[in-house]
Image (spheres, coloured by chain):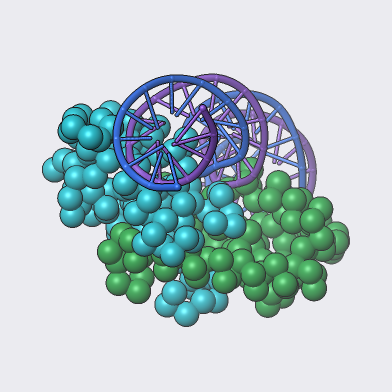
Chain colours: A green, B cyan, C blue, D purple
Amino acid sequence: MLDRELKKGSAELLILSLLEAQPRHGYDLSKLIEARSGGVLTFRVASLYPLLYRLEKRGWIQGRWIEKAGLRRRRYYKLTSVGANVLASQRDTWKEFAQAISRIAGLESV
Amino acid sequence: MLDRELKKGSAELLILSLLEAQPRHGYDLSKLIEARSGGVLTFRVASLYPLLYRLEKRGWIQGRWIEKAGLRRRRYYKLTSVGANVLASQRDTWKEFAQAISRIAGLESV
DNA sequence: ACTTTATGTATCGCATAGCGACATATTGCT
DNA sequence: AGCAATATGTCGCTATGCGATACATAAAGT
């Protein structure tokens, strides 16, 4: 990622979207974002974990500890019904935002 | 605008893009962004003026005072050749960024 | 045996940038 | 005189990404 500031505000949408399909733990989310974006997007743990706590505190996601033999403890988060609504709203906001930027900056349908 | 954080990092691209076509002054840029985005994007003066100073300090834009009878003094900014290169680079970055977000968040070509 | 790498969660403190509120000044309309 | 629009400018608050650091376990490399 070239510009750190560009990412602000888009992290929530990313996390919520990934948790829509299935529950995941923090480290998994971090790797998944990097892989799926082809390295364009990366989220460091110092950003990611505090973000997950915020989202859980707001009731948008729900986490629980899973312990398995031979594995370190993991905290899996799943999307709540409230979170699903927020996600739908944030998707709309993102679309509007991206379209506005593209229009003004003279970019084709991105 | 719903999410203030979402805008961070995109302001430079916006300003640089608008100055590509013709020199403009701050107040004009502010009104233009709001109008062209259909109200989705707004930039307050407390964000805009410091941003213009930063861009000028970096040599990406060049400002000069214009005084006309019957008008308040205005500072018109024009894009420099360095700024034009930066703009091209930022357009690429934005495209990559927007595509990555859309792909992960499950959005069609935005 | 030792080192590195990967997995997994956690926190401190810094840097950045948008903006509400406020300030100042000129012009035009009522 | 009063108010809105135009035009530039600044203080202080807030949010958030992340470098650095820490801790713990397991697998792979040398």
Q: Relative to the observer, which residue lies in front, D10 or A50?
A: D10
What residue sits 50% from the left and 70% below the top? A95
Residue A9, given in percent of the width and then of the height, sits at 57, 53
Judged left or right of residue A77, residue A7 is left
Q: Is residue C2 left or right of residue A94?
A: right
Task: Residue A80 in the image: state x and y as whole percent.
Answer: 80, 70
Q: From the viewer's perspective, is A45 left or right of A57?
A: left
Residue B66 visible? The answer is: no
**In the picture shown, does residue B63 fall above or below A36?**
above
Looking at the image, residue A19 lies above or below residue A12? below
Residue A27 location in percent, x, y? Answer: 66, 57
Residue that extends furthest to the bottom in the rendered view of this protein: B108
Quadrant for the C terminus of chain A in the image: bottom left
Looking at the image, which residue is at 64% across and 63% down?
Answer: A15
User: In percent of the image, x 17 and y 33: which residue is there?
Assistant: B68
Q: Nearer the viewer, residue D16 or D12?
A: D12
